[in-house]
Amino acid sequence: MEEALPDQGRLQGWPVRTIVLAQALIAREIKGQYRRSWLGPVWTLLSPIIYTAVFVFFRSLFNIPTGETPPVLFFFSAISVWIMVAGIVNGVYPAFSGNISIMKKMAVPRSVFLIAATGTPLINFSVSMAATIGLLAYYKVAISWTVLLAPAIVLLAVLLAIGLGMLIVAISLYRTDVLHALPAMLQIWMLLTPIFYPLDIVPQNAQWIIAMNPLVGIVEGYRMIVVLGVLPPGGMMMQSLAITCVVWAIAFPFFRRNSRYVADVL
């Protein structure tokens, strides 16, 4: 049975309409996500823990360096960011396709579904970040003031993920091949991001590939300010910001022009 959503009378004015409906959609998603799961919300932490355990195992096999950072902290902090970004990218299309009936019944801005797609991944990330702070305490790593900059990097990660999600939805209106290719593309993207290896071991002839990945600066920046307690290089962060802006410059006009047809095509 579907959760009740706010009725048309409550949604007066697009700002209120967007906020109220987004809250309702996020609440419905959270309630339904683990409804038939034995472990329920435990999966919020279990997923990054499993990834971290696998990375620690392969580190022991291939002697992957993590510097002075405890391996668990090195891997867990980075994979938490990745899971959030991948969750948003994966969630934008279902946020639209799963709410076609709402689009047909209510005149709501399409941005509400973009906001709704970020809800669960952001909540899960908040739990993972709290666990990261707990790991810092466990390993007796001093918590620096730089951790206060984490929201800025998280915001950049969310904007990047939403931009890519918009592009996927817009393209899928013409060809659904992008949806079939998405899982493989996300796996390749994860391998090209320094999550389970440090950036400085990337060969020089492969640096150009890393330079094209906006998530490099986001993941490395987050790990630096939260785990290492240092400011990330400004050039690296500006590169991630610039690529994110390019993604939005391409995706937003394309999405805005085609979003009116979403309810008819999906």
Image: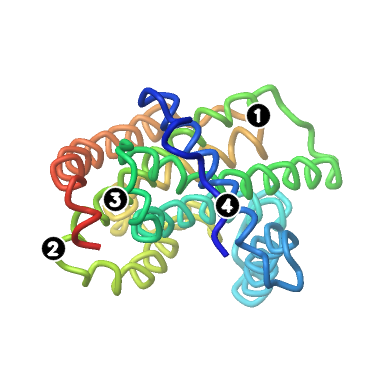
In this rendering, the label closer to the viewer, 1 or 2: 2
In this rendering, the label closer to the viewer, 4 or 1: 4
Return the disc, 4 or 1, that comes first in the chain's sequence: 4
**Judging from the image, what secondary structure is the residue with disc 3 in?**
helix
Return the disc, 3 or 4, that comes first in the chain's sequence: 4
Amino acid carrying mark 2 in the image:
Tyr
Amino acid carrying mark 4 in the image:
Arg
**Judging from the image, what secondary structure is the residue with disc 1 in?**
helix
Give the farthest residue toward the bottom. 61
Nearer-the-camera pick, 94 or 245: 94
Return the disc, 1 or 2, that comes first in the chain's sequence: 1
Residue 191 image point, x, y percent:
43, 65
Query: Residue 174 bears which disc, if any?
Result: 2
Q: Which residue is mark 4?
A: 28
**Judging from the image, what secondary structure is the residue with disc 4 in?**
helix
Q: CA distance from mark 3 to mark 1?
A: 43 Å
Residue shown at 28% from the left, 48% from the top: 166
Residue shown at 39% from the left, 55% from the top: 99
Return the disc, 3 or 1, that comes first in the chain's sequence: 3
Q: Which residue is mark 3?
A: 104
Residue 253 image point, x, y percent:
16, 38
Give the farthest residue toward the front. 9
Return the disc, 3 or 2, that comes first in the chain's sequence: 3
Residue 119 image point, x, y percent:
54, 44
Query: Residue 147 bears which disc, if any?
Result: 1
Amino acid carrying mark 3 in the image:
Lys
